[in-house]
Structure formats: structure tokens, C-alpha cells
Amino acid sequence: MGLALAFCVFLWIEQGQKPALEYLSAYLMEWSLSIDNIFVFILIFSAFSVKEKNYGRVLLIGILMAIVFRIVFITVGVVLVEKFHWLLYVFGVFLVYTGYKMFVSVEEEKDFDPQKSKVYVFLKKFLPLAPHDGDGKFSVIENGKKKYTTLFVVVIMLAAIDLVFALDSIPAVMGIVDTKTHSYQPTARLVIYTSNIFAVLGLRSLFFLLRNAVNKFDYLPQGIAIVLIFIGVKMLAEFWINQWVDKTTQVFISLAFILVCLATSVIYSIFIDRANESEKQKQLDDDQAH
């Protein structure tokens, strides 16, 4: 996070205020989605009984693979948007729909079973898998045949899950960054790439920081959902917004809205969690008194 914020300062000095604030807005958007990522990562580690000593190595390899996939995904997306600007409106509709689904169906993610996911079913169908971690190895030889361990499966699943999250986050970043102004496009590409990569690079440290606390942010997905809907509506109403508000002011508004939504959802989550804990403690005290 320190490196990401330092890069924001560097971008401000080298490129000016607008790209720096776009980068910060996009980074915060990606970073908040990364917290949602971590909950799924915890479920995957638990489902495949990954030992704690292997967490760091598995996360590092999975995240490096995710960065490669994201670079490919972003490159294709940026080229398509630059050639067919109307795709931004398609992304806008997609973000509004995704935000709505995320807002009303938060519990579905908690019911996610990694061993029933399409990625695991696919790997199980086409690869010989061993039902253990091979003492920290990604593949082992059993009965003269090469088999892939649960650690290999987990690495592939981490990269695949991140790519699924990228389907939401990359269109959202394109809605924050000015990709329409032709002379600004090289800088816009830089902002899109770096905000994504810095956010994904922070996933490993963020996992160790939040793995025991991520369940306390129960209302963060709703905050993220509201931000996605806001960005989607902004993309759909781009023509009319540009008539009344200049690009720099739009960036300020987007950044402020993202900060307010994320901070409010986190604070509200902590408040509700403490209220629930107090209620449980009060109930326990009453039971003991009786």
C-alpha cells in the first residue's frame, strides 16, 4: 500500500493532478474488491486444507499468475474500448447489473463451495489429482504416474477467482479513467494498468492482515455494490455529465463518492459487529444470572 500511494505521488509530480486522482480512485476501487477476494481465498484454503506454512508461497504464485491474466484482459479491453467507444455503455449496464446482484445476494458468496466450483470440476476432469499437498510440492509421482497436488489446484483456483473478480473491476476502472480523450490515452492506459497491478500485488499482505477480521466487514460488499452502480450510471450518462461537469471535477466527485461509500460500509460493519457482540454478552450474562 505504501508503494501504491508513493506511485500516486510520483504520478502527480510527473503527469499532474488528474491522472493521479484517477489512479487513486481506481486503486481504491480495486483494493476494496480485493478484500472481497480474500474471503473467497480463505474458503479455498480451508476447503483444501492448505497448511499455514504454505500460504505465502501459494498466494505469491497465484497472484503472479493473476497479474499476467489481468494484463492480457486489460490490454484486450483497452484496445476494444479505444476502437469501439460504445462498449463503455455495455460495461455501464454490466456494472449496474453486477452492483445490484452483489447488493441483494451477498449470502451467495458465503455459500461458495470451492470443491464444487467449475474450475475444480474442470481440473479434476482433465488432470490426475492427488488428494494431498505432496508435502509442499505442486506435483508428485505415484505408481509411476505424475499427479498434481492440492497446492497446484489452489494456485490455479486463486488465479481463476481473481480473473472472475476482474470482470467487475476492470470495467469499473475504465469508468473512472478518461479513455475518450485521444491525447490522454497513453496516460489512461498507464493508470489502468498500474492501479490494477498495485492492488493485486497488495493481495498477499492484505490476506495476512485481514484473514481473521474479514468476516467483520459484513456490509462492505453493499458499499462496493453501490460504488459499482454509481460508476455504471456515470458511464451510461457520460454524454450529459460532460455537458455540465468538467473531467477533473468528475474525478474529484468519483474519488469522494468511493471514499465515503467504503468508509461508511466498514464503519457500519464494525458498529453492527460490536452491537451484536454486546447483545450476545448481555444474553450470556442473563443466562448465567438465571
Image (cartoon, rainbow, N blue to C red):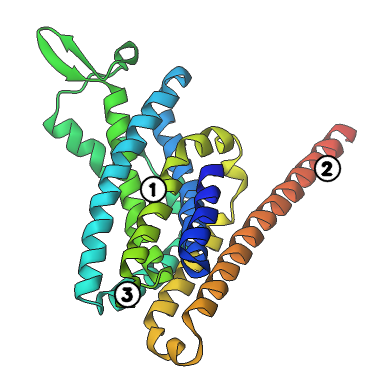
Residue 154 vs residue 259, the one in the foreground: 259
Q: Could you tell which of marks 2 and 1 lies nearer the N-terminus?
A: 1
Name the residue at the top extreme: 143
Which part of the image, by quadrant, shows the N terminus? top right
Label 2 crowd (10 A; few <14 / some 14-19 / many >=20): few
Label 1 crowd (10 A; few <14 / some 14-19 / many >=20): many
Q: Is residue 275 above or below residue 144?
A: below
Residue 121 vs residue 185, the one in the foreground: 185
C-alpha distance separating marks 2 and 3: 62 Å
Residue depth check, mark 1 versus mark 3: number of the one nearer the observer = 3
> Residue 197 got which mark?
1
**What kind of residue is marked 1?**
Ile
**What kind of residue is marked 2?**
Lys
Residue depth check, mark 2 versus mark 1: number of the one nearer the observer = 1
Residue 169 vs residue 173, the one in the foreground: 173
Give the SS element for disc 3: helix
> Residue 282 got which mark?
2
Q: Is residue 53 left or right of residue 115?
A: right
Q: Quadrant of residue 87?
A: bottom left
Query: x, y (%) of residue 284?
Result: 80, 37
C-alpha distance separating marks 1 and 3: 23 Å
C-alpha distance separating marks 2 and 1: 46 Å
Name the residue at the front extreme: 14
Give the SS element for disc 2: helix
**What kind of residue is marked 3?**
Ser
Residue depth check, mark 2 versus mark 3: number of the one nearer the observer = 3
Q: Could you tell which of marks 1 and 3 lies nearer the N-terminus?
A: 3
> Residue 183 got which mark?
3
Query: x, y (%) of residue 110?
Result: 47, 46
* Residue 104 is at least partly visible in this image: no
